[in-house]
Every structure is written in structure tokens, then in C-alpha cells.
Amino acid sequence: MLLYLRKSMKKKNLRIIGLFAIGILIILFIMKYIGIQEILEVLKNVKLSFFLLGLLIQLFLFGLWGYRWEIILEAVKERVSVKNLYLSLFIGVLFNNVTPAAKTGGEPVRAYILSKMESISSERAFATITADRIFDSFPYALLSLFSVLYLFFFENIPTWVTYILVFALFFSIFILLATVYLCINLKMAKRLILGLMNFVGRFFPKIKEYSYTVEEKIITFNSTILRISKDKTAMVKAMVISFLILFCGFFRIYFVFLAVGYNVSFIVPVIVTIIAIQVNIIPLLPGGLGTTEGVMVIIFSIFGVPIAVSASVALLDRLLSYWLGISIGALCFFHSHISIKRETEK
């Protein structure tokens, strides 16, 4: 069994490396198509002060995200150290960005790491993370609606962009409602998950042995979600922070534009962020690597931004929003791996 798991992990790692390579090749193709020299000319004149402002905004965004999670944890009477909370958060960001799992690949890892470093069960930790992601969805759905209405009444852009935003709006609302329904409806959640286990159990009979354990975890998960929903103060705080996080993303892109010496309407970062989030939801490449950059260049160009400037802004913004998270997450993963190993050896 152990040999099978090792082979399975090896295949999965090779798949991730392959997808990463595809994403990098897409970026190189975009740069080659636009003109590497033209992009370098823009990047050579970057105003470091504005770029550093973008960096500070991204770090502030991470800080807000951790604070929101802390509020949710406190709503279920779970107090954890700030250090372990942010270690878990950044490790989750790392796995979200290196797995093609629609920005959910890192959430089970985040729950696991926190449960190993703190006295909290993995299912309770995962319930708080699910609530954290639900709070993310509300401002996104509202801003998607605003973007669609704004483009429809005030901008003359290709119809397909509006269609994408409409799809993004309805898709995000559907996912949000479905997630909330399953979280609060214990009977439906048990029916869905246990039904799935029974189906898989036809091919792997051993899985059925875990049905009782899984049912207990579903009950714990459900009770944790309901407890969070009853803390109105925590919910209001988390919702306000969710809007601040989204606006941090808008301002980050805006300052990156200023860094390359180009002024744009603030609506441009809003529209691009909404569409980029939607692209990242599609589980194709790790963290939307390559596809997100391509979509950003296209949307910027539609708004009249020169193609070389569009590519430069996309690359710089992804350096802050994507590669920064991977770098910090990798350091946190290495640190937590050593810490957990020491605790296990005691």
C-alpha cells in the first residue's frame, strides 16, 4: 500500500511539474509574440516607489486575510498563535498556487497544518477555512454584478467580455449558494458525501470502513459552521475585511500601472480582477499560471492600454499576487515541516 501511495505521489508531482512548465511556456509565448525587447523597455523604466507601494498593499492583503481567519476561529472559541495561523495560511497559499485545483488545493493542507501545530481538530479547522472562503465570495459576487452593469451601460467593449462577466456572476452565485446550503444542511451534506463514498466503495471496498468516522467529522464540521453563523459581530467584521481584501487587489494593480508610468481608469483593475479570479477558478493550470497573464493582457488591451504596457503590468502584478505567495509559502512550509517533525520526535 505504501509503495502504491509513493508511486501515486510521484505521478502527481510529475503532473504538477508538467503543468507548471506549460504555464511558463504560455508566458514565454506571450512575451515573444508581443516582443521581449518592447516589454523590457517598459520594465526598465519602472518607478520603484509605486511598485513598492503595490508590494506593501499585497502584504497588507495577506495581513487582512489572516486577521479575518483569526476572527472566524475566535467565533468558535478557538484561540491559536498568530505565528502558527500565518504559517498555515501561507502554506495554503503555496499549495493553492502550485496545484490545478481551482484555488482549493491548499485549503485541506491549511487545515492539516493548523491542526498539527495547535490543539484544534482538522474538521473544525477546515470548517473555519470553508467559512473564510464563503466570506470571500460575497464581495466578489457583488462586484461582478457591478462590473456587468457598468460595462453594459458605460463602456463599448466586445460582447464576449460581458458574457464572461455574466457567466462569472451566475457561476459565483451558484457556487456560493450551493456551498452555504451544504454547510448548514447536515442531512444533505451527509447524503452527498456518504453517497459518494458508497459509489467509490464499489471499486475500493476498504473506503466503506471509514463511513462512521467520516459521518462524525461531517457533524463536527456542520456544528462549527452553524456556530460561526450565530456570531453576528464576527460575521460583520469578516464581511468588511472581505471587501477590503478585494479592494487591496484593485489598488495593487492600479499602483503597478503607475509604476510603469501609465494612468488608467480605476474601473480597469476592477474588471481585470473579477475576470482573473474567474480564470483562477477553472482547474486547468497551477494558480492560473499563463492563462491569467494572457487574459489580463487581452482585457487591458481592450481598454486601450498599449500591448507592451499590458504585458509588463500583468507580469509585475503576478510577481506580487502569485510568485510572492509561493516564495513566502515555501519558506513557511520548510519551517513548519521542521517544527512538526520536532514535536513528533518528542
Image (spheres, rainbow, N blue to C red):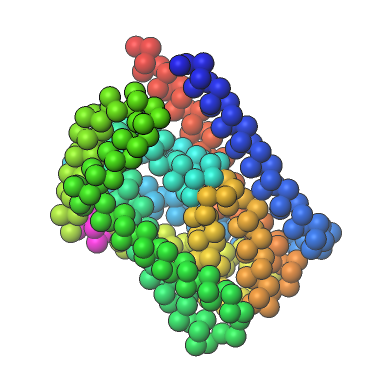
Residue drawn 63% across the image and 42% down it: 19
Q: Nearer the viewer, residue 338 or 303?
A: 303
Residue 172 position, x and y percent, is: 40, 63
Residue 234 drawn in magenta: yes
Magenta span: helix, strand or loop, mainly?
helix
Residue pushed farthest front?
A: 202
Q: Is residue 252 visible to us here?
A: no
Say if 26 sits above or below 327 in the image.
below
Say if 158 sits above or below 123 in the image.
below
Quarter of the figure with the C terminus? top left
Q: Nearer the viewer, residue 228 or 11?
A: 11
Quarter of the figure with the N terminus? top left
Q: Is residue 108 visible to us here?
A: yes
In the visual, does 116 lie left or right of 258?
left
Residue pushed farthest right?
A: 37
Say if 203 sits above or below 93 in the image.
above
Residue pushed farthest top?
A: 346
Residue pushed farthest bottom?
A: 153
Start and end of the magenta stretch?
233-237
Q: Nearer the viewer, residue 306 or 164?
A: 164
Residue drawn 69% across the image and 45% down it: 22
Residue 177 position, x and y percent, is: 30, 61
Residue 218 position, x and y percent, is: 23, 39
Residue drawn 51% across the image and 20% down it: 4
Residue 102 drawn in magenta: no
Residue 51 position, x and y percent, is: 62, 59
Residue drawn 47% across the image and 73% down it: 166
Location of residue 29 (image quadrant): bottom right
In the visual, does 224 lie left or right of 29?
left
